[in-house]
Amino acid sequence: MSPELKFAEDTLQIAALTFMAVVYALKVRWILKFPAARDRQARTGRGHTGPLKGATYSLAAIAMPWTVLSTRQQPFFWVQFAIFHIAVAASIGLSFVIPYAAHLLENQMLVFGLQALFAAAFLVGVRRLVRRIVNPYMRAISSPDDYFSLALLVVWFASSVLAAPPSHEQREWPLLGYFWLTAFFLVYVPFSKISHYLYYPFARWYLGRTLGHRGVYPVERGA
Amino acid sequence: MSRTRSHKAERVIERMRQKVTRQMMLSLEACVHCGLCTDQCHYVLANPGDITYAPAHKADQLRQLFKAHLDWTGRALPWWVGARSVYSDAELEELKDTVFGKCTNCRRCSLACPMGVDMATFNRMARGLLVHVGIMPEGVAVVAKDQWEIGNQMGVLPEEYLETLAWMEEELQSEYHDPSVRIPVDKPDCDVVYAINPREVKYDPRTIAEAAAIFHFAGEKWTMASVGWDQTNFGLFNGDDELGGAVARRVYDAVAALRGKKLVISECGHGYRSTRCEGPNWGRVDVPFEMESAVITMLRYIREGRIQVDQSKNPGPVTYHDSCNIARSCGLIEEPRELLNLVCADFREMHPNRAENYCCTGGGGAMSMSEYTSRRLKSAKIKAEQLKATGAKAVVTSCHNCVDGLFDLIRHYKLDMQVKQLVSLVASALVVPEKPARAVKPLAGYKILVIDDEPDVRVYLRMIFKDQGAEVIEAPDANQGIRAIKSENPDLVTLDLILPKMTGEKLYWEIKKDERFARLPIVVVSGCIGVDAPRIDFHRFIAEKHLPEPEAILEKPINPEKVLETVRTVLENRKDRH
């Protein structure tokens, strides 16, 4: 293994993760500066739910596409979402597995599965990028960061496909590319829309707590 | 070179800094611009291709401002994350057009958002920022001013309100041939204080009478307040939390002053949400009494057997429109359906329904913004199609804005359909209990005290009551009257208001403030309730003294049938309660 790869998969990743953690710590401090609104109203609804149930339901809705109107109507969109985000988690996991537990990747089926997942996520990313460019509604709400974040992930998924097989000696360039992209991804995330994963659980929690308290969540659907 | 910012733009930014809460900033940051909210909005569906109606685009108006002034990246690299500040009054006017004219704050997009971004809350906040600097549609300004200054959003004057209640009371008494059907005002210590929408006074007083009939036949101890009776709240629509808090507190204070046990809110979507849910937050007050929608009250009366209904009295096919504020923001979803199934023979759902229903298009204060009427009616196409598909002949809703919005769209799209409220259907389905057969001498066993300074009147009343079997005692003035009450313990008093030495009003006060006689039924029989001394003065007297209303008020000259009917009903009701 070259010193460049050794640096990229270890020291660089630790530095990037440390940077991300520091920025996130500052972000949490920033979030806490905003006053939390207090809900004084007495509970409404039929008593079948409450703030905790509503908040839990709201958080779990991400995995229950049938409960949210938009994803129920567009199940394929939700499938894309699932592939995309599972691939993100898997690719981040891969950045730890390669340097510290490479033996796990000796299983060819696992490697093939990961490659298939990254390839599928790559296609989803391309599709979403095209949608964002072609659809006038999407264009109207997209900022440069929206395009760049998506493009970054598309490239990262492509590099993940190439990085999955554990062959440091023969295939250093794909790995170097993957680890440098990963480091950039980690540094860039806190400043981009990708940091939604930090915010959305809280946004969902608060909305769910309020709507649970008011008897709206879990949403009851009639005939 | 930095751009100069107008004074109003400066104030808008400053206000935003003060108003953004943690919940809101997390929601603002969570949006990923996935676009899944786009086709959940009735405006988008009715205006395909117009990106300015897209919920995320509308929400971005506030998000861009937030990013430009409060978000890290937005301040460092605004163009990169789409941050944009406001500089001119013209930009604020553009913002007004979006947040007031292209969104009804119905919250459908919020519920459809996979990230839980509450876009309707952003829109309301953006409205509030503009209202803070005086930028809003004229209709919104007028209504908000009325609510601040006159105390209700339609500028109903106290006389108009009280006269309407008196008129409806007379209508009810005539309809049911029962003078004991009352619309009490400022009666303290009631189980229910009923608050209404001023639209009911102005345009639809029949709904007040219908509710009164339901309370009466349910045997409810209820009242309306002479002040703080408007449960609507334009603070919800114009985003002004201060107005919202002040209006809500006015209602809460009225209930507290009357020592009411429960506030019942008439069918009004935004009024219910504002008074029941948002008011305590805006007003920063912990409300010490219960509050409920009249829908729940009516359903409870039926469940408890306090009123009987016959669904065959409403035979036509009806559908139900969920008011956004009631269903999507307050969870009042199944109760109206349960009630409809009890009072209507043919109830059919529209689709989608419940929390996923489409807006009536009249919400969010849209009915007061005439400049956006054409947009509103165009966007109503979705609702019109929904309604038509049901095949119903009437659409029922629990909201006055929905009534107006639906009425407009039904007329615009030429649908063969009426708009009704649940209170009307319940009232028309009421099975009025038959009065017990009259005994030969129905007042036998009762002791009645007649207090009147005119000997002829005393003799006349004594004759009427004695003929019906009552024992009659007479008193020519207040002092003898009070002595007779103490010594004879009568079952009922008829009281003249003009008496020597001490007026009937004062005597009424003496009786009611004495715990031993506070529950003694009093029927006021007086000639000073006419034009020269309006009946309203007696109401004012008892309101000022926080006294309960008398059981009945009858005018001289005496109508013997009416007097007998009244006294008999009062005594029967009293017997029932014991």
Image (cartoon, coloured by chain):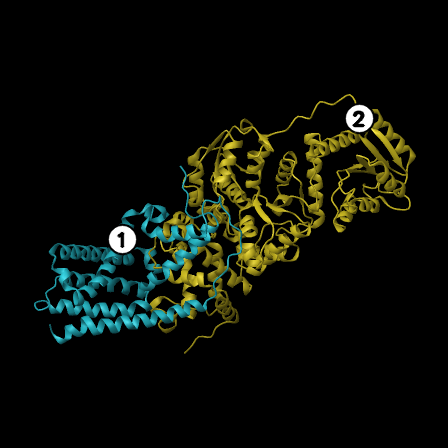
Q: Which residue is mark 2?
A: B444
State which chain is coloured yellow.
B
Q: Nearer the viewer, residue B127 or B279?
A: B279
In the image: residue A108, left or right of residue B550: left
Check the residue under mark 2 and report the chain it is in. B
In the image: residue A44, left or right of residue B225: left
Q: Nearer the viewer, residue B106 or B458?
A: B458
Q: Amino acid at mark 2?
A: Ala
Q: Give the mark toward the camera: 1 or 2.
A: 2
Question: Tell me, what hue is chain A?
Answer: cyan
Is the residue at mark 1 from the same chain as the one at mark 2?
Answer: no
Q: Residues within 10 Å of mark 1 (few under 14, many from 20)?
A: some
Can residue A82 be seen here? The reply is yes
Q: Residue at (46%, 57%) from the top-left corner?
A: B121
Q: Secondary structure at mark 1?
A: helix
Q: Secondary structure at mark 2?
A: loop
Q: Amino acid at mark 1?
A: Ala
Q: Quadrant of residue A118?
A: bottom left
Residue B165 horizontal/vertical position (percent) = 69, 42
Q: Which residue is mark 1?
A: A82
- B576 in relation to A2, above or below: above
Q: CA separation, marks 1 and 2?
A: 82 Å
In the image: residue B468, left or right of residue B282: right
